Each structure stands twice: as C-alpha cells, then as structure tokens.
Image: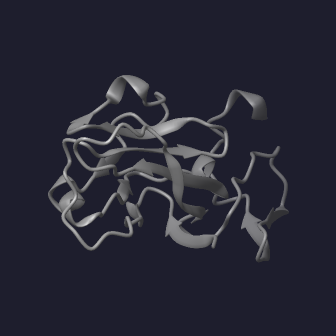
C-alpha cells in the first residue's frame, strides 16, 4: 500500500515505518535502510550503528531515526528542511530483522510512501523569474491542483537569478 505524506517547504516530516513484530527487536541484529525512487540512500542502519558513509550528500544531515524506538520495531525517519526537490519522491524502507543466531541476510521492502511538498503559499512548483511586466500570470501545476497567481511586478524586487537577466 502506497502512503501519501504531505508537508511544506522547510518543515520537518516523519516517514513512518514499523516492523511487524510482537517481540523486542535486537538493534544488534537489525539492518535497514531508506532510499528514494532514484535509489539514493537517505538513511542506513546496520547492527546497532548508523552508516552515514552510505548516505547521499543530498540527504546528509537532514535525516534522523528514532533509535530509542527501534526496539519496538519503529524504523521511521524524520526528514528535516524539506525542499521542492523532495516533492513527489517515492521513499522506500528495506529491513531485515533476523534474530541473533540466524544466517539469513535477506532484506525486504517494508514501507513505501510518496512525499508531497508544497511551497509556503501552497504552491507545488517553483516560480521562475520573468522580465518585468505590468502584471504576469504564472501557472503552478501539481498532481492535485492548478493555481494561477497574479504577481504585481511593481512590488517585486529584482530577480536574484542569473537566468533572468
């Protein structure tokens, strides 16, 4: 089942995931990781240790897990400072919770979700700069909505991007 998570740019959000277990999880044998739809690793945990060397720079310092809750099977992660680049990314968790003394190293997909990130004003796409005009209309599109914005160019400061010159 695909879960949808909604958040706003620059906010933190939790990607929830729990292992199906009725007994305590031994973190010394727990192995799991999270990756996005580009196969970029955002978090990796192997037998009691975080593995930051496997994490893509894009996610470094932005992802934390709830280590105190792992013994209850909680392998959720928190994404800090969400960006529009995170919008519509599909995130998957893969886990292996074999108890001590087992030889199996099979890791299976446990959770999957899509992150929907909207701008501070509810816009799901970045507005690009345009050359000044009396009034401009920008079309911001997302899967769920179309928003038309009217921008008063007299109040707008000069464009900070080189591509607008």
Q: Please name the residue shown 84% across and 61% down the image.
A: 134
Tell me where residue 28 sits by quadrant.
top left
Side of 164 relative to 31 (left or right)? right
Q: Residue furthest top?
A: 53
Q: Toward the viewer: 71 or 54?
A: 71
Q: Please name the residue shown 49% across and 33% down the image.
A: 58
Query: What percent of the width, then of the height, locates residue 42?
Result: 46, 40
Question: Can residue 90 be seen?
Answer: yes
Query: What percent of the width, then of the height, locates residue 95?
Result: 43, 50
Side of 10 relative to 108 (left or right)? left
Q: Toward the viewer: 2 or 62?
A: 2
Q: Toward the viewer: 101 or 25?
A: 101
Side of 101 relative to 40 (left or right)? left
Q: Toward the viewer: 19 or 50?
A: 19
Q: Please name the residue shown 47% across and 53% down the image.
A: 82
Would you place residue 33 above or below residue 11 in this image? above
Would you place residue 46 above or below residue 2 in this image? above
The colouring scheme, among rainbow, by chain, secondary structure or one colour, is one colour
Q: Please name the residue shown 25% across and 43% down the image.
A: 29
Would you place residue 158 above or below residue 97 in this image? above
Query: What percent of the width, then of the height, locates residue 19?
Result: 37, 64
Q: Residue furthest left?
A: 68
Report the label total.
0
Q: Quadrant of the C terminus?
A: top right
Q: Quadrant of the N terminus?
A: bottom right
Query: What percent of the width, then of the height, locates residue 24?
Result: 18, 64
Tell me where residue 55 sits by quadrant.
top left
Question: Can residue 118 be seen?
Answer: no
């Amino acid at each position: 089942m695909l879960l949808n998570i909604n958040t706003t740019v620059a906010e933190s959000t939790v990607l929830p995931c729990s292992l199906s277990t009725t007994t305590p999880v031994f973190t010394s044998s727990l192995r799991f990781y999270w990756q996005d739809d580009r196969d970029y690793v955002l978090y990796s945990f192997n037998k009691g240790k975080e593995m930051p060397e496997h994490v893509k720079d894009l996610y470094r310092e932005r992802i934390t897990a709830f280590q105190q809750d792992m013994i209850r099977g909680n392998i959720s992660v928190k994404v800090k400072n969400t960006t529009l680049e995170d919008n519509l990314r599909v995130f998957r968790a893969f886990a292996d919770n074999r108890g001590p003394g087992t030889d199996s190293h099979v890791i299976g997909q446990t959770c999957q979700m899509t992150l929907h990130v909207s701008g501070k004003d509810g816009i799901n796409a970045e507005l690009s700069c345009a050359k000044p005009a009396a009034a401009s209309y920008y079309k911001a599109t997302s899967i769920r909505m179309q928003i038309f914005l009217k921008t008063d160019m007299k109040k707008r400061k000069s464009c900070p991007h080189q591509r607008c010159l």
